Image: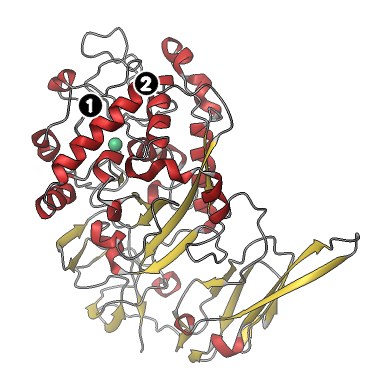
Amino acid sequence: MRPTLSVLLLAIPFVAASQDEGFRCLANNPAELEKHLAATPGAWEHALQAKATLDDHTATFHRGGGDPLIIPVVFHIIHDNGDENISDAQVNDAIRILNEDFNKQNPDWVNVQPAFLDLVGDMGIEFRLALKDPDGNCTNGITRTESTRTYDGDFEMTQLIQWPRERYMNVWVAASANGAAGYTYYPTWLDNWPEADGIVILHSYTGSIGTSAPYKSRVLSHEVGHWLNLKHCWGDSNEPGLPENCNMDDEVEDTPNTSGWTSCTLSGATCGNVQDNVQNYMEYSYCCKMFTHRQGERMLAALTSPIAQRENLWQPENLAITGVLEAPQLCSARFGASRREVCAGIPVIYTDQSYFGVTQRFWSFPGGTPSGSFEETASVVYEQAGIIRLRSTLAMAAQRSAPLKSNTSRYFRTLERQHPSWRDSRIQPPCPTIAGGARIPMRTGASSKQTSQPTPEAIQWCSKMDGRTRGERTGLFRAPSTLAMPRTSTSPSGTHTHSAMPTMTMYCAST
Ligand SMILES: [Zn+2]
């Protein structure tokens, strides 16, 4: 059934009460799409024409093997120095899972229900982090942008940074995905809306490690499915489980008609079926482990179509431009610091984020303990209050050995980078011991106003300081405590309550 605007716009975005309570996708983000259609005369007609063109191509498309089609990828981490600033390792883990899922290499595909085992598809699509940015500079395919827009996760956030969609698949990782776990749009909507082309995903649904978890790690496969023109198994809405969903279709022949699932009910059967394909990636169940053959054909058809410039992505010329065919070379020496402001005596964790192939490193930490390190990660304590000028006191060399062309001897290439000034560490006086009933100045990690309800749990909260410095207020605390903190942030696009934020920790600004 062809989607109608009313069907799309009636799909009410689900605002997660908790980011971990159930997977919700906001396919074709109706609120943003509605704004786009209202502001762009002819956009609706263009999308319908694009759909007709892509449908025609899909109906006749068949790919009989061949090498995988490679898609260069960039992850844009939009962060406010919080948990959403996920590690490179977490991004690499997400890419690994994506490649497993799209090449029938996910170990759990053998656990697909017997009725669907023969339908498990192998897409032959490979995702590689870009090694060259749009200007031809080296990159590890991960950018980091500091912005409180991360709490919105909306279209405006994606406009902070986007690489050309005809060369890269853009993935934005954020603290919010506009109320869902992730969202993107069909290529037919994006054909004349390149600014929105890409996938927004919660940091806590990216990969299986770090801030995410294995059971949430397949959401990116789901969103890439949409990005390559797949619908939910029940059809064109974001609300599974409704009986009327049986009247919709996902336009894929080998997926049973279904009303859709939010749970892993393996024996589930709706719409007159013997059994539904509950384990399909395009369901909301938490046991997804397969695409079907026909879903694969539909995605490959989208990828070989000019609609939304998808066919340009995997062309040899583009693979050369984005560097994904090259062996990674050492091209950047950089590092991160866990805190930007600490009390004296509280460790700062420095982590080497250089890429690629670092074989040696040396850190120096004047005034700190230890004063230097050769390790990938170093925990350093400063005992004197003050601002640590990392720019002048901390530098790192990364070395990588590589063979000379003419013989087997080796040379070393050394890169150095000074710390950018924003990473200066402000060392505060030692944390005070807070007596019950004391009023102290404090800072929290929120970007704007917030409410707090200190729990009675008495712990040494100063040891829980994190690296966030935004927002400042005076609080009355009856005991040293952590804050279970529902928080409200106000942004130009409105007020959002982020009730899913984990326990926040606070720290002293001064005594
Ligand atoms: Zn979805």
Residue type pointed to by label 2: Thr
Where in the figure is residue 334, as x and y percent of width and height? 58, 72
State the residue in front, 505 or 170. Answer: 170
On the picture, is 301 further left or further right than 453?
Answer: right
| Ligand 1 image-quadrant field | top left
- Mark 2 neighbour density, 10 Å: few (under 14) some (14–19) many (20 or more): few
Where in the figure is residue 95, as x and y percent of width and height? 51, 45
Give the residue drawn at x 49%, y 71%.
338
Q: CA distance from mark 2 to mark 1?
A: 21 Å
Residue wearing tag 1: 235
Between label 2 and label 1, give the one nearer the viewer: 2
Where in the figure is residue 62, as x and y percent of width and height? 44, 21
On the picture, is 62 further left or further right than 448?
Answer: right
Say which label, 2 or 1, has the lower sequence index: 2
Where in the figure is residue 267, as x and y percent of width and height? 33, 13
Which of the labelled discs sits on residue 55, or is there none?
none
Count the marks.
2
Which of the labelled discs sits on residue 60, or is there none?
2
Give the residue drawn at x 27%, y 82%.
438
Please tell me whether mark 2 sits on a helix, a strand or a loop: helix
State the residue in front, 124 or 509. Answer: 124
Give the residue drawn at x 29%, y 68%.
148
Asked if 335 appears above or below 252 in the picture, the reply is below
Give the residue drawn at x 33%, y 66%.
482
Residue type pointed to by label 1: Gly
